[in-house]
Structures are given as C-alpha cells and as structure tokens.
Amino acid sequence: LLNSFANKLFAPGRITPKVVLDHTLKPGNFAELVTTFVEAFRGAKLEAVNIRTAFVSVEIIKVEESVEKSAKQILEDTIKRKKVLSPAEWEKLQEKIRAQSMKDFEGGVATLNPDDMGKIRGKMESSISQLLRTYDARIRNAQGNAKMKA
C-alpha cells in the first residue's frame, strides 16, 4: 500500500522529489524513509497515529466518496430519464446499484489486507443502504403522484 502510494505521489506531473535529511525522496526509498521517521518519532506522542492506518483511512475515504458519487449519479440520471419508476423497476435499480457499488468499492480497496477489508465492507454497505433509503422517499412520492394523476 505504501509503495503504491509512493508511485502515485511521484508520478510525472504530480510533485518534484525533494531532499529530506540528505536523502532524495523518490518511490524507491519512500517506504524506507517514512519507516525511519515513524521509528524515530514512535514515542514522541502517545496518541500518534500509526502511519499505515492513516494511509489506509485516506484511501478508504477516497474510495467511499467515489462510490457514493457514482451511485448518486446513476440515481439522478435514472430519475431525470424516467420520472416515475414502477416498484419492480425501483427494486431492480437498487439491486444494480448495490452490486455495482460493492464491486467498485472492493476494486478500489483491493490493495488492503483482508482484515482491513472485512472491517470496512459493512460500513460501505450501510452507506449505500442509507443513500438508497434517501432516494426511496423520492421514488415512492413520484409513484404516488403518478397514481393520483391516473
């Protein structure tokens, strides 16, 4: 995970390598340099955040935000295209969004170890369920309005 982060960080056009304590910062020595700093400052503060946990948390948040944004976009596009969904269409759309969201999420966090993935999978499923509940009220309201007009 740290090597992957370093390669992304030092991709062409992102940042220019710097010299830190007489060591040029580059993908090849990034993990070693960070590890050295972590070891050097390990006892500096009791509440210090484990650097690996920090990197994992940042990656998870980015993936969660991306997945939720994609799910919202699918919902908004569907509502714009088709003002009223039948209950069967709504159920099918929810299944599609759940499946696609979890596929995207698992792909986005594939570099994590299985223990980390197990801890966060349920949280992502809960977030998607909450998003769908929010849209459920809009969908049901549109269905009710359509029935009243008919």
Image: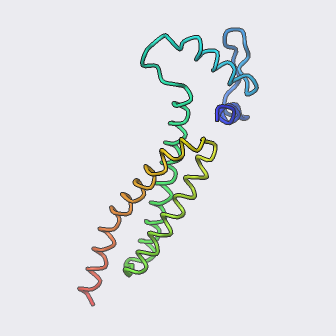
Q: Residue at coordinates 50% horizontally, 11% vertically from top-left?
A: 43
* Count of numbered tags: 0
Position of 12 compared to 83: left or right? Answer: right
Residue 103 position in % (x across, y down): 57, 58
Residue 129's place in the image compared with 81, above or below, is above
Q: Residue 17: which quarter of the image? A: top right
Residue 53 position in % (x across, y down): 52, 31
Q: Residue at coordinates 63% horizontally, 20% vertically from top-left?
A: 34
117 or 133: nearer the viewer: 117
Position of 15 compared to 62: left or right? Answer: right
Residue 99's place in the image compared with 45, above or below, is below
Determine the residue located farthest toward the right in the rendered image: 28
Residue 94's place in the image compared with 88, above or below, is above
Position of 85 compared to 147: left or right? Answer: right
Residue 44 position in % (x across, y down): 48, 10
Please state, as top left, top right, bottom left or bottom right, where the C terminus lies in the image: bottom left
